[in-house]
Image: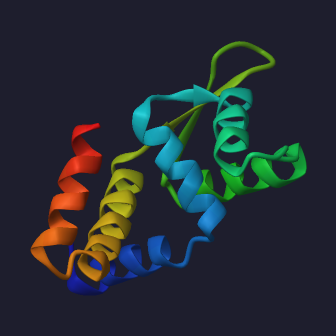
């Protein structure tokens, strides 16, 4: 893979909205069907997530090959994080942590969060 392709893939992931990044984060745990993703996001946002918001964003993530989509049955699709999606999550975490961990005290706070 060329450097231009790598930069293009990274910038694509970095161009995601916060909502799309949160969908990816939910899918890092396990593959889920749409309503399960919706419930997880509603728990996080503490408000209803409209179908008209969720599914177009899932479709965008599928188009960008960050999420895979498969049929569970004729009415239900399952969504799974792709390798490219996992790399996008890791890239975001790396960038966020590089901004937050500016001292040993903050590094310890992160270690504590991970251990919980």
Q: List the single residue furthest toward the top.
A: 73
At 42% from the left edge and 54% from the top edge, which residue is drawn? 85
Q: List the single residue furthest toward the front.
A: 105
Among the 4 quarters of the image, the one containing residue 79: top right
* Left or right position of 35 against 1: right
- State the residue in front, 32 or 4: 32
Among the 4 quarters of the image, the one containing residue 84: bottom left
Q: List the single residue furthest toward the bottom.
A: 4
Q: Quadrant of the C terminus?
A: top left
- State the residue in front, 110 or 73: 110
At 16% from the left edge and 60% from the top edge, which residue is drawn? 108
- State the residue in front, 65 or 98: 98
* Left or right position of 33 against 48: left
* Residue 76, horizontal then vertical, whole percent: 74, 21
- State the residue in front, 77 or 116: 116
* Residue 37, horizontal then vertical, whole percent: 65, 35
Q: How is the image coloured?
A: rainbow
At 67% from the left edge and 27% from the top edge, which residue is drawn? 36
At 38% from the left edge and 62% from the top edge, which residue is drawn? 88
* Residue 106, horizontal then vertical, whole percent: 22, 70
27 vs 92: above or below = above
Q: Quadrant of the N terminus?
A: bottom left
50 vs 12: above or below = above
Q: How many marks?
A: 0
């Amino acid at each position: 893979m060329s450097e231009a392709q790598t930069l293009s893939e990274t910038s694509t992931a970095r161009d995601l909205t916060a909502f799309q990044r949160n969908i990816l984060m939910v899918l890092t745990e396990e593959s889920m069907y749409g309503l399960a993703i919706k419930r997880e996001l509603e728990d996080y946002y503490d408000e209803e997530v409209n179908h008209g918001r969720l599914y177009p964003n899932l479709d965008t993530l599928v188009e960008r090959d960050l999420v895979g989509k498969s049929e569970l049955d004729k009415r239900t699709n399952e969504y799974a994080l792709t390798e490219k999606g996992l790399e996008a999550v890791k890239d975001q975490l790396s960038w966020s942590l590089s901004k937050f961990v500016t001292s040993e005290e903050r590094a310890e706070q992160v270690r504590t969060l991970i251990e919980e």
